[in-house]
Amino acid sequence: MNDSISNPVWTTCKDAAGIAGNIFAFGLFVSPIPTYRRIIRNRSTEQFSGLPYIYALMNCLICMWYGTPLVSADNLLLVTVNSFGAVFQLAYTILFIIYAERRIKVRTLVLLLAVLSLFAIIAVGSLQISDRMIRWILVGSLTVVSLISMFASPLFIINLVIQTKSVEFMPFYLSLSTFLMSTSFLLYGLLNFDAFVYVPNGIGTILGIIQLTLYFHYKKKSTQDSMEPLIVSHA
């Protein structure tokens, strides 16, 4: 295994997969911008929820911490992608708090402070563990739980698509970006022999395939239905 990691071609492939994951993740990070343009324009969060950004911030912070040399070796591409992600999610959350009504504003602020406090506890607490292997396993396990929770969130959308037979609430480019990002980090984790990276991203890849399959299935069905004549002639 050590010979493989030190092989220049192996390292290049691993880094390429990690860089690709960073690029596709950036597409995910900027995807809420149209929503926030609307929020800023209307000076109201309307019916939008701030919870997804809170959860995403927690996920980015935990994964960023796992990627640091203090926890795991040779995972700096996890630090870069999740650092950018944390900045974006924090910015989205702050904007949400600014434009939300008072009751939601207070609740979201409390949740934000809770997330930051929990991350501080995880970071400081894990540093108290002198055994690097135990620290790696502990933070890695939290990373797996966090990533699987994030990847499982589209299950609601998948269920909605099946029930409504419509892809209206499942944006194609968002699903595609999620799939490409998960696949890239699946390869990155495999090439780095890191189960804490490739297991959750493997699950994310499978869910991405399901989303894209459903999208094309119901999109094609919707197109076929729209081509049917509105008035059937019996002449």
Image: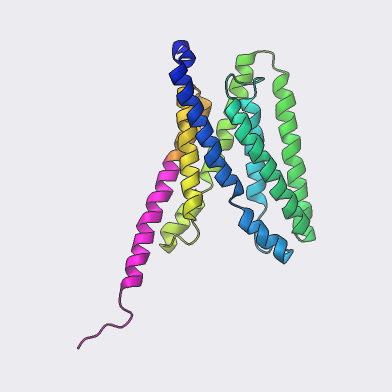
Q: Where is the C terminus found, in terms of image quarters? A: bottom left
Residue 90 shown left or right of residue 56 in the figure: right
Front residue (pair 138, 73): 73
Instruction: Say above or below: 189 vs 6.
Output: below
Residue farthest top in this picture: 3
Query: In the rendered image, which quarter is residue 227 located in?
Result: bottom left
Front residue (pair 112, 1): 1
Q: Identify the residue at image location x=61%, y=53%.
A: 32
Colour mode of the rendering: rainbow
Q: Where is the N terminus found, in terms of image quarters? A: top left
Front residue (pair 65, 21): 21
Instruction: Say above or below: 71 vs 173.
Output: above
Highlighted magenta segment, given as a residue range: 206-235
Residue farthest left in this picture: 235
**Observer able to see residue 199:** no
Q: Identify the residue at image location x=50%, y=35%.
A: 20
Q: Position of residue 2 (x, y in %)?
A: 48, 11
Q: Identify the residue at image location x=62%, y=35%.
A: 82
Q: Position of residue 181 (x, y in %)?
A: 50, 39
Tell me, yes or no, whether the highlighted magenta stretch contains residue 44.
Answer: no
Magenta region's main secondary structure? Answer: helix
Q: Identify the residue at image location x=40%, y=62%.
A: 165
**Observer able to see residue 168:** yes
